[in-house]
């Protein structure tokens, strides 16, 4: 085949409608239905005995960590079921008995496969042997591991400079794999290490670094149990972090209150039926949110400013609403913040927020008399142009109330992928950390680069402009996770070599560089054995605890390899045996990797020993009320601007969301029972009054368009679903709607995509 011929692959996949069915949304989370769906999925994918054996081991102290979200395990896990519905689905998805081998790729070209949906691609099963896509070919063919490593090394040696290579990391990888990956990139000479944090909680890291001195949350799981008030902002725990509902239930049982701030009233925050209790099966469940504030999309700052103004007015009367001792001792910027709040008109803030004033007043009354307050948030705050400022505004509330650095209070950014925080802790970052560089030089024996690399946006741009030639991914589905899908596809296709270290087939295996490699890896739940010895990984949860994870299931084939081993063998193929890093030994000895992590990565100490059982917490300055690294040695109260969207008369504000049958870009099924949608994904949720105003009816078909910088982007063929959402607001599933998000519009400073506030129009078909 002509090696210069462009492959005819689709970055969109199937856009067909299936037999959509709409029902009333389910008004409670989990319960019998959750158990049934969890077991139904795992039994189908893995078989009954394998499923039960793995489920009983998942999230246990000497078991393996769930491959789904990063929610922490309790100090004393349930011995029977320390997992949720979506964790069970992730396990079944990872350990499916369906496999993809060389015969599959011989029978199916990437052009044919690319016409399928992401759901259909995922259903084909586990990748079980290394495959290569040669220039001009449309069929992958087998390749040996040794050949694969040699090919990567050869392509890297062709580069004019190391910055023509990009190393992307997904949150699923272990600390050991991520550490080696980051050290390999630095030893090569580049800091081009974009990661999935760039697309989700980068805004959180910057905002928390600005205000509190650390880019992580300050709470521990146990803090939620006896908090007086928990704010859940821009987060849907019932689908995205279901085990969090158990913690909220304990909080409610101890007299705590929950406030939900979200354009959608999600089922998990309406009612929770705990499947680990008898009442969760036969009772009515626990009502969750005491107050729901249906804020307009990305109008959280006007809402919080209005709440702060009202609290400040009360404090002026009594001097007991704000914690003045805490403010004086630990914070900077109090007077400037109050002065700024005085400049805003309350009526205008109220209108902008879209929230009924009686609900805001009820929130103010609740917060005024409480000090043990936790703020939890996710993408609903981070994925906006003003994502960093959104988070800083909520930190203002915590600082004014003295709800920082004490039990049952603080910040709780709820991370998505199970080790995304650990990846950053062990050095996956595009920016330069001079102190880490010094430790690398001292303990690993090479000099890392001292210039900044590219983040996700920079990676897309570099590839699109032909400035990057080799693109390697440690897990993930970069094409479908990133913004502006068409632009991203064009960028990837410009590369000479793309490498995917993966467990399952996805669209990034089909939209590739001129040469492409698939390197199949061991899953989180599987045994990693070398020379007759079982090995284990470590991971870090959303609250900064590092623990061991050891799989128990048989690998799908003898030709899959662990991620640390793959990376170390790439290192050896490129550097040989005379390099400062002992790549040959590191491929086999994870204890040595952990020893190097302890020496190089801040806060890690005696990890081999301390990661056993429940594990250990990394240091967190906020928990010690140590703000010495910040201006004047104090936490920072900040002044944040209002969002400025300037919608045209025919434009709406769209936020992208997950269905209940997906995790990130992985689609487990086609149902979203919490929202009443079955057998469909190409839907858009719309307020009935908005529908009536423009003559749209239920299940009418529309194209969704966005216009930025004069360029019109189109997401084709979506069906209208009437839903309880504020007027002028829309919601639809990603990754199907990522095509609408312009690559060059992102959060200030963090460059997180604006996936939760996209200006769109609807075009009836």
Image: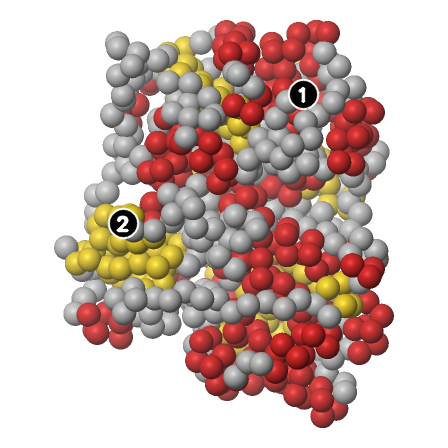
- Which residue corresponds to the image point at 78% horizontal and 56% vertical from the top-left? 630
Quadrant of the image for the C terminus?
bottom left
Residue receiving disc 2: 712
Label placed on residue 542: none
Crowd around label 2: few <14 · some 14–19 · many ≥20 (10 Å): few
> Where is residue 40, by image quadrant?
top left
Which circle's residue, 1 or 2, is located before the other in the chain? 1
Residue 367 x/y as whole percent: 65, 79
Q: Relative to 39, does residue 234 appear above or below in the rendering?
A: below
Choose top left, top right, bottom left or bottom right for residue 585. Answer: top right
Q: Residue at x 26, y 54 (%)?
A: 704
Is 18 in front, or is 639? 639
Q: Which residue is more in the foreground, 125 or 440?
A: 440
Which quadrant would residue 362 be assigned to in this image?
A: bottom right
Q: Nearer the viewer, residue 142 or 431?
A: 431
Q: Is residue 763 above or below residue 521?
A: below
Q: Is residue 37 visible?
A: no
Q: Residue at x 38, y 49 (%)?
A: 741
Q: What element does badge 2 sit on?
A: strand
Query: Of residues 315 and 645, which is closer to you in this image?
Result: 645
Element carrying mark 1: helix
The answer to whether 681 appears left or right of 638 in the picture is: left
Location of residue 438 in the rendering, given as x and y in whole percent from the top left corner? 79, 30
Q: Which mark is residue 187?
A: 1
Which residue reaches farthest bottom? 317
Placement of the N terminus among the 4 image quadrants:
top left
Task: Specify few, some or many for label 1: CA neighbours under 10 Å numbering under 14, 14-19, or 20 or more.
Answer: many
């Amino acid at each position: 085949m002509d090696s210069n011929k462009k492959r005819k692959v689709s970055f969109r996949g199937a856009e067909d409608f299936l037999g959509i069915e709409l029902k009333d949304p389910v008004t409670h989370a989990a319960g019998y239905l959750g158990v049934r769906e969890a077991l139904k999925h795992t039994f189908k994918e893995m078989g009954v005995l394998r499923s039960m054996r793995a489920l009983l081991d998942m999230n246990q102290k000497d078991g393996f960590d769930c491959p789904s979200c990063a929610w922490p395990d309790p100090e004393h896990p349930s011995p029977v079921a320390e997992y949720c519905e979506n964790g069970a689905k992730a396990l079944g998805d990872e350990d499916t008995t369906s496999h993809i081998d060389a015969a599959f790729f011989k029978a199916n070209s990437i052009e044919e496969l690319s016409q399928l949906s992401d759901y259909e691609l995922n259903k084909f099963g586990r990748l079980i042997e290394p495959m290569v896509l040669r220039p001009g070919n449309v069929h992958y063919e087998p390749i040996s591991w040794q050949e694969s490593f040699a090919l990567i090394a050869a392509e890297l040696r062709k580069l004019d400079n190391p910055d023509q290579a990009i190393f992307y990391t997904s949150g699923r990888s272990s600390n050991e794999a991520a550490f080696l990956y980051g050290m390999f990139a630095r030893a090569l000479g580049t800091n081009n290490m974009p990661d999935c944090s760039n697309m989700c909680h980068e805004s959180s890291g910057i905002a928390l670094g600005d205000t509190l001195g650390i880019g992580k949350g300050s709470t521990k799981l146990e803090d939620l149990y006896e908090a007086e008030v928990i704010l859940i902002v821009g987060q849907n725990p019932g689908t995205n972090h279901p085990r969090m509902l158990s913690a909220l239930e304990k909080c409610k049982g101890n007299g705590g209150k929950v406030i939900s701030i979200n354009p959608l009233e999600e089922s998990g925050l309406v009612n929770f039926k705990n499947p680990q209790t008898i009442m969760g099966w036969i009772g009515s469940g626990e009502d969750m949110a005491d107050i729901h504030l249906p804020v307009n999309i990305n109008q959280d700052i006007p809402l919080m400013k209005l709440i702060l103004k009202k609290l400040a007015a009360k404090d002026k009367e009594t001097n007991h609403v704000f914690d003045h001792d805490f403010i004086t001792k630990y914070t900077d910027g109090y007077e400037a913040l109050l002065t700024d709040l005085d400049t805003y008109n309350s009526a205008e803030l109220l209108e902008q927020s879209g929230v009924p004033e009686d609900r805001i007043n009820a929130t103010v009354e609740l917060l005024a008399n409480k000090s043990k307050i936790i703020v939890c948030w996710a993408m609903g705050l981070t994925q906006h142009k003003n994502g960093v400022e959104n988070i800083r505004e909520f930190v203002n509330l915590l600082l004014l109330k003295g709800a920082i650095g004490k039990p049952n209070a603080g910040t709780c950014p709820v991370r998505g992928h199970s080790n995304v925080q650990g990846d950053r802790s062990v050095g996956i970052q595009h920016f330069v950390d001079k102190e880490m560089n010094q430790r690398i030089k001292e303990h690993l024996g090479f000099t890392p680069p001292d210039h900044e690399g590219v983040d996700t946006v920079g990676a897309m741009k570099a590839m699109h402009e032909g400035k990057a030639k080799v693109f390697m991914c440690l897990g993930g589905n970069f094409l479908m996770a990133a913004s502006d899908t068409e632009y991203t596809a064009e960028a990837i296709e410009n590369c000479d070599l793309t490498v995917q270290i993966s467990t399952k087939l996805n669209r990034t295996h089909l939209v590739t560089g001129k040469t492409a490699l698939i390197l199949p890896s061991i899953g989180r739940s599987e045994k990693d054995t070398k020379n007759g010895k079982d090995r284990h990984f470590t991971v870090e949860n959303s609250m900064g605890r590092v623990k061991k994870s050891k799989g128990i299931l048989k690998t799908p084939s003898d030709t899959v390899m662990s991620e640390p081993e793959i990376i170390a063998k790439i290192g050896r193929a490129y550097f040989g045996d005379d390099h400062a890093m002992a790549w040959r030994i590191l491929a086999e000895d994870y204890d040595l990797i952990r020893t190097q992590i302890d020496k190089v990565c801040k806060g890690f100490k005696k990890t081999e020993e301390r990661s056993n059982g429940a594990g250990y917490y990394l240091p967190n300055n906020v928990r010690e009320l140590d703000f010495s690294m910040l201006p004047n040695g104090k936490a920072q109260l900040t002044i944040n601007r209002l969002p400025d969207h300037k919608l045209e008369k025919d434009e709406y504000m769209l936020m992208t969301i997950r269905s209940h049958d997906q995790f990130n870009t992985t689609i487990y099924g086609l149902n979203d029972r919490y929202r009443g949608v079955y057998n469909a994904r190409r839907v858009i949720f719309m307020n009935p009054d908005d529908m009536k105003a423009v003559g749209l009816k239920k299940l009418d078909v529309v194209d969704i368009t966005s216009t930025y910088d004069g360029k019109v982007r189109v997401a084709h063929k979506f069906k209208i679903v009437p839903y309880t959402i504020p007027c002028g607001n829309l919601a639809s599933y990603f990754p199907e709607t990522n095509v609408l998000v312009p690559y060059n519009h992102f959060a200030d400073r963090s460059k997180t995509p604006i996936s939760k506030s996209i200006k769109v129009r609807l075009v009836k078909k």
